[in-house]
Image: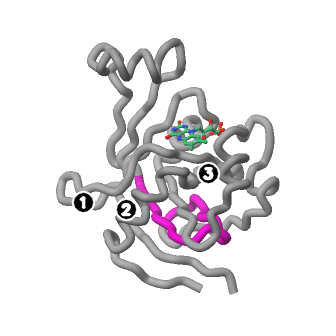
Amino acid sequence: MYKEIGVFEHANIVLEKMTPGVFLNTKKGNVINTMIIGWGGISVIWGRPIFIVLVRDSRATYDLIESSSEFTVSIPLKDNLKKEIGICGTKSLRDMDKFKECNFTPIKGRKIDTPIIAEVGLHYECKVIYKQDLDQDIVPQIVKSRYYNKTANHTVYYGEIIDQYIYEKE
Ligand SMILES: Cc1cc2nc3c(=O)[nH]c(=O)nc-3n(C[C@H](O)[C@H](O)[C@H](O)COP(=O)(O)O)c2cc1C
């Protein structure tokens, strides 16, 4: 069952849930995937509602989002889903089907192909309208040594929010 919500109505919850983490869902062909993100959030850019996400280029998710230019974000509302966040924040699509591992039900987005996770609660459907690889030459040194020392770079994706709702399994 879908409950309609305003695009900014739950923005405070979104930001609060970035720690411990929310689910970033992607799809390429018949392959679906989800991973945990802790950085990003809802914002307004060019007069549009935008969900910003940062994805390292080492993630399987990176290949999927690069190919589809769309994503959904699913945010736990009732259940904190600690075990599932642990799995989806450490295991890769290259190791396992995380939807199966977590007993998650994918439901096709209302406006895009990428699914949401039926068990999770609050959902945003997004189309990438801009992206940018972080320029390591101008990243602050303190951030660089902590987050980018020999590790993969982040790409920042600006996903225009084209649908948002709460979904409850019947
Ligand atoms: C709390 C938490 C927050 C995370 N935030 C991000 C993030 O913002 N961006 C990112 O690229 N990876 C982040 N990760 C790591 C990915 O979720 C993890 O590497 C995942 O296994 C990648 O899956 P994939 O290879 O199937 O895409 C986070 C992990 C945790 C536990």
Tag nearer the camera, 3 or 1: 1
Q: Which mark is residue 161?
A: 2
* Residue shown at the point (73%, 54%) measured from the top left: 83
Where is ligand 1, by quadrant?
top right
Q: Earlier in the sequence, mark 2 or mark 3?
A: 3
| Up/down of 159 relative to 148, above or below | below
Contact between marks 2 and 1 (CB within 8 A): the answer is: yes
Tag 3's secondary structure?
Answer: strand
Residue 67 place in picture, x, y as percent: 54, 41
Q: Ligand 1: does it lie within 8 Å of the C-beta at label 2?
A: no
Q: Ligand 1: does it lie within 8 Å of the C-beta at label 1?
A: no
Is the residue marked by circle 1 packed among few (<14), some (14-19), or many (20+) residues within 10 Å? Answer: few
Inspect the image, locate mark 1, and give the three-letter code of the amino acid beneath it: Arg
Residue sticking out furthest to the left: 47
Q: CA gap, disc 2 to disc 1? A: 8 Å
* Residue shown at the point (45%, 29%) measured from the top left: 154
Q: Main secondary structure of the magenta part?
A: strand
Residue 95 place in picture, x, y as percent: 79, 37
Is the residue marked by circle 2 packed among few (<14), some (14-19), or many (20+) residues within 10 Å? Answer: many
Q: Which residues are magenta?
A: 112-127
Contact between marks 2 and 3 (CB within 8 A): the answer is: no
